[in-house]
Image (spheres, helix red, strand yellow):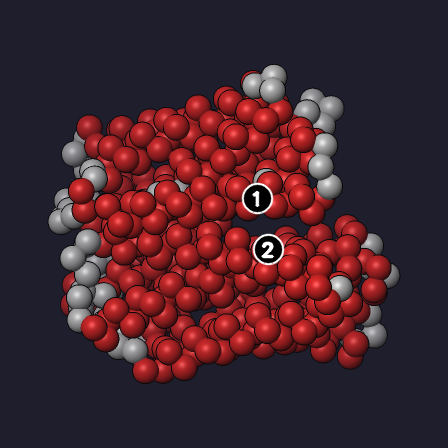
């Protein structure tokens, strides 16, 4: 790969760290916001709903805008919004009559930037002249995992040294990351995803059955990941009897670390492995991890199942992106935007199903997880159906 495009890929890696910051920093401050501003916990948790809701809306609406103004202007705008949103967290609550309205405004700003990043980063990497798209995509998505781990670890250390009252300083520090990446994207080359004459129209894209098959796979990939990730802390707290802080470190961080490891391993050795077989094997391993979590009588084994689930879901999201790009020529920005939308729908529907089923069975979290095994099961059967029909491709797929 051209040396300059290596810098482009590195800037995209940093973009996923930025997205990890905007998605995972504020949840660490929920109780701090509650005590400092006197806001109810239900209103504070609504900030997460708004964050992902805005990102879903951006996924849906951004494709046409991006194609008109270009990738460089769009991704620089995304980073600017992320930085402004993080900085606004420290300013707006004091300027609004109600602090919650200030927090909500800041979340809307950085969520818009985060949604744009999700749509933009994968196609930018896909367009770079790399020899192995699957390898590059897997490495790219691993940086969200490492960003998640870094946000939790560094924030925990910072709060341990400086106290929770210094959270504004940390917010300003995290805002420096997107600002630094703006400078990178001003300089690096960005290749076009598809030639204008080769790109599919929106009508042609949604008219392809295989496109909708990949949409289903993305929903299942997102749901398989988040159905366990969002509840990993609760598993650690309940199963091991540890504090919330230790639960966060033992649960979500274990999950994110294992997911990152799987993506790095595939990113390093991906050219030697068959993505089709790896995806199916990962789905089967994911099913096994769900059964281990939900049916094991030993709490430690349930927690190990969380880590195993992180390892199994690692390549699902980037692998589906790669297969869709190889199988649908000319999908362009619209395809990546809709795949991101489907993935986010899965990210919200997986934890929701777990919560609803758990509540119905008297807050039995294991039963909720057992119900969510539906998602990796659908993913495995969907992959087998695509591959046996000969309609899914990895490296040079041109079939429709």
Q: Horizontal and vertical percent for residue 400?
A: 18, 44
Q: Residue at x 50, y 22 (%)?
A: 291
Work out whether residue 208 or residue 37 is closer to the camera in this orientation and state it: 37
- Under circle 2, the secondary element is helix
Question: Does residue 120 appear to the left or right of 166 in the view shown?
Answer: left
For the residues bearing labels 2 and 1, Cβ distance under 8 angstroms: yes
Q: Horizontal and vertical percent for residue 245?
A: 69, 47
Q: Counting residues from the N terminus, which is met first, the one under dot 2 or under dot 1?
A: 2
Q: Quadrant of the N terminus?
A: bottom left
Q: Is residue 360 above or below residue 193?
A: above
Q: Quadrant of residue 216?
A: top left
| Residue 152, label in figure | 2
Question: Does residue 127 appear to the left or right of 48 in the view shown?
Answer: left
Q: Horizontal and vertical percent for residue 235?
A: 64, 33
Q: CA distance from mark 2 to mark 1?
A: 9 Å
Q: Is residue 280 above or below residue 116?
A: above
What residue is pinned by disc 1?
A: 252
Work out whether residue 10 or residue 90 is closer to the camera in this orientation and state it: 10
Q: Is residue 139 above or below residue 100?
A: above
Work out whether residue 233 or residue 380 is closer to the camera in this orientation and state it: 233
Q: Horizontal and vertical percent for residue 154?
A: 59, 60
Q: Residue at x 35, y 33 (%)?
A: 282
Question: Does residue 237 appear to the left or right of 121 in the view shown?
Answer: right
Question: Does residue 221 appear to the left or right of 2 in the view shown?
Answer: right
Neighbourhood count class around disc 1 (C-alpha, 10 Å): few under 14, some 14–19, many 20 upward? many
Q: Residue at x 73, y 67 (%)?
A: 162
């Amino acid at each position: 790969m051209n040396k300059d495009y290596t810098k482009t890929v590195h800037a995209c890696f940093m973009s996923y760290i930025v997205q990890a910051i905007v998605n995972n920093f504020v949840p660490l401050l929920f109780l701090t916001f509650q005590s400092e501003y006197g806001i109810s916990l239900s209103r504070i948790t609504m900030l997460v709903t708004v964050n992902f809701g805005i990102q879903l809306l951006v996924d849906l609406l951004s494709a046409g805008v991006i194609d008109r103004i270009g990738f460089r202007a769009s991704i620089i705008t995304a980073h600017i919004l992320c930085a402004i949103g993080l900085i606004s967290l420290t300013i707006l609550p004091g300027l609004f009559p109600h602090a919650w309205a200030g927090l909500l405004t800041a979340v809307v700003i950085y969520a818009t930037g985060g949604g744009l990043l999700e749509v933009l980063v994968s196609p930018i990497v896909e367009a770079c002249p790399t020899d192995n798209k699957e390898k590059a995509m897997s490495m790219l998505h691993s940086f969200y995992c490492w960003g998640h781990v870094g946000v939790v670890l560094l924030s925990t250390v910072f709060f341990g040294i400086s106290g929770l009252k210094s959270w504004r300083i940390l917010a300003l520090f995290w805002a420096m990351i997107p600002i630094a990446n703006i400078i990178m994207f001003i300089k690096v080359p960005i290749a076009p995803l598809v030639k204008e004459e080769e790109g599919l129209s929106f009508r042609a894209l949604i008219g392809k059955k295989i496109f909708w098959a990949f949409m289903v796979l993305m929903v299942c990939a997102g749901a398989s990941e988040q159905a366990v990730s969002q509840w990993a802390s609760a598993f650690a707290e309940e199963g091991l009897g540890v504090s919330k802080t230790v639960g966060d470190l033992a649960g979500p961080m274990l999950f994110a670390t294992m997911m990152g490891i799987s993506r790095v391993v595939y990113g390093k050795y991906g050219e030697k492995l068959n993505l089709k077989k790896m995806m199916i094997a990962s789905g089967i391993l994911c099913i096994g991890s769900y059964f281990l979590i939900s049916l094991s009588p030993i709490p430690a084994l349930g927690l190990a199942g969380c880590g195993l689930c992180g390892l199994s879901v690692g390549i699902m999201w980037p692998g589906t992106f790669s297969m869709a790009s190889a199988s649908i020529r000319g999908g362009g920005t619209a395809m990546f935007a809709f795949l991101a939308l489907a993935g986010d729908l899965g990210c919200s529907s997986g934890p929701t199903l777990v919560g609803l089923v758990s509540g119905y069975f008297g807050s039995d979290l294991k039963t909720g997880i057992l119900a969510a095994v539906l998602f990796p099961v659908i993913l495995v059967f969907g992959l087998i159906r695509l591959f046996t029909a000969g309609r899914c491709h990895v490296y040079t797929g041109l079939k429709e």
